[in-house]
Image: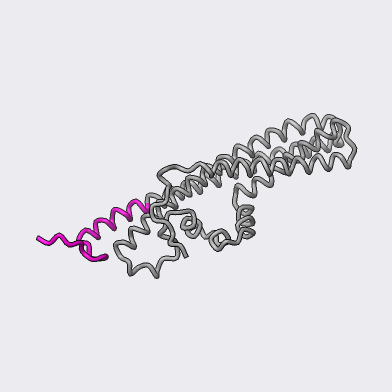
Amino acid sequence: MSTETPPAGRDPEAAAKAQILATEHWSLLATRTLTYNESLGRVTIFLAILSGAVIALALVAQADRFGATFITIAIPVLLAVLFAGIATISRLTALNRDDYRWVIGMNRIRHAYLELHPDLKPYFITSPYDDLGGALQTLGIEGAVSGRPLGSVFHLLQTLPGMLTVIVAAVGSAITGLVAVALGSPRPATLLIAAAGFVAVMGLMALSNRRSFGRSSPSLEPRFPSPRV
């Protein structure tokens, strides 16, 4: 009885292995779809809250001419919107971490496909490697893959958490501006305080998201890292 390992692509159990891998691949793909659906649902809920708050404040402003009553109502309403926005971004960040996990799993399965059939490599446009570079290539974030940090920053602002962070920062800016007006600050100082509020919220959200992605699970440690060029 021969104990030699069959050549790549001639494994007698290749068909069974491919079927098992394909089942897991479709399972991960379905899970990614659920992740996307929840992300869109969360964004829709937040935008509904934001729109309702803006419409309500517009009606109050018409009646009070942006007086003390308007400021008294606007600050708590916008604080509720700010809380909803922060909660939404936190959940979207968690969903993005989950999606990253599913991408890593699909990359590993793709690597297994190529182990079974190396001749299929020219037909894949996504990565078979399970490190950060491989995941970014599969996600199509070309700026980060090619070493262009500016493109990577613009991509982050185009994502759902990035866009919502800008909106939430604007809400934070409005809150700080209204507080300044309530305290009797002059207009130039109010503008500076509002701008500082915008920058502060942006910075805090960026720091929070960075720390969130800095915590990685041992199961995500690269097993098939990208080859060094």
List the single residue furthest toward the front. 228
- For the point 33% across and 58% down, the residue is 112
Residue 23 belongs to magenta span:
yes
The percent position of residue 219, horizontal first and vertical second, equals 40, 44
- In this rendering, would 166 be left or right of 39? right
- In this rendering, would 110 be left or right of 147? left
- For the point 50% across and 45% down, the residue is 97
Quadrant containing the N terminus is bottom left
Q: In the picture, residue 111 is in which quadrant?
A: bottom left
- In this rendering, would 11 be left or right of 30? left
- For the point 64% across and 39% down, the residue is 85
The answer to which of 109 and 25 lies nearer the viewer is 109
List the single residue furthest toward the left. 1
Is the image coloured rainbow, by chain, by secondary structure, or in one colour? one colour
Does residue 9 sit above or below 180 in this rendering? below
The answer to which of 70 and 141 lies nearer the viewer is 141
Does residue 23 sit above or below 143 in this rendering? above
Q: How many marks?
A: 0
- In this rendering, would 28 be left or right of 45? left
Residue 183 belongs to magenta span:
no
* Residue extent of the magenta highlight: 1-26
Q: In the picture, residue 227 is in which quadrant?
A: bottom left
Does residue 52 sit above or below 3 in this rendering? above
The percent position of residue 127, horizontal first and vertical second, equals 44, 61
The percent position of residue 187, horizontal first and vertical second, equals 89, 40
The percent position of residue 100, horizontal first and vertical second, equals 48, 49
- For the point 83% across and 38% down, the residue is 62
